[in-house]
Amino acid sequence: GENVEQHPSTLSVQEGDSAVIKCTYSDSASNYFPWYKQELGKRPQLIIDIRSNVGEKKDQRIAVTLNKTAKHFSLHITETQPEDSAVYFCAAADSNYQLIWGAGTKLIIKP
Amino acid sequence: KAGVTQTPRYLIKTRGQQVTLSCSPISGHRSVSWYQQTPGQGLQFLFEYFSETQRNKGNFPGRFSGRQFSNSRSEMNVSTLELGDSALYLCASSLQSPYEQYFGPGTRLTVT
């Protein structure tokens, strides 16, 4: 079945710098890749997603890239701000349309 | 429109008891998924319901069950509670799983 690995588990960046979180998946049939942000004590919220017919998608300071050949996708956050501090989860939809989740990345923005 | 709601928000139970959690999806959403979240374990998929039918099930024991009503509200039941069942239980609704899932605030279950 599908397996999703996420790295790093913790990422600390200076405010204003960029952050990159990477995920790899195992099922070549996967075709939907969302990213969720979970602030401390709050519910996960979808921040961006990408489907397999697209290589890159941007939304203001956030972008996701997908490499289907290598079976990996990444979240890019530019000009990081304190409110970007959170745990970020990636996921991939398997052939049963079930989301398989990465273990999460704790992003720390240093002032 | 109103978001996903879950009741109760907090629950303390004793080992061996059973518990029922409730989830009300966003109006118009027919898919409801349930997840268990524990520190360091991320989100573990329990099951997904669509139009009152269970479409997917994760790797959890049979003590974990669920159902969905005709108004799309969903309930999750855990029988014979174990200490390891202590977790945050999240539900998420969408028009069509797995796309654009909206999460509820969760139910924090503590088993003593």
Image (tube, coloured by chain):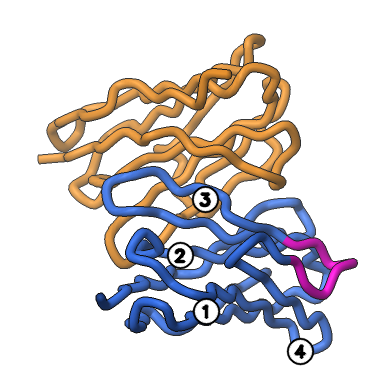
- Element carrying mark 3: strand
Of marks 1 and 3, the one in the foreground: 1
Q: Chain of mark 2?
A: A
User: Disc 1 designates what residue?
Assistant: A21
Q: Is residue B64 above or below residue B19?
A: below
User: Disc 2 designates what residue?
Assistant: A88
Amino acid at pointer 3: Phe
User: Disc 3 designates what residue?
Assistant: B45
Quarter the C terminus of chain A occupies: bottom left
**B18 and A45: which is toward the camera:** A45
Amino acid at pointer 4: Ala
Q: Which residues are magenta?
A: A50-57
Give the percent coordinates (x, y) of residue A3.
61, 73
Determine crowd level at label 3: few under 14, some 14-19, many 20+ residues with C-alpha closer than 10 A: many
- Element carrying mark 4: loop
Q: CA distance from mark 1 to mark 3?
A: 22 Å
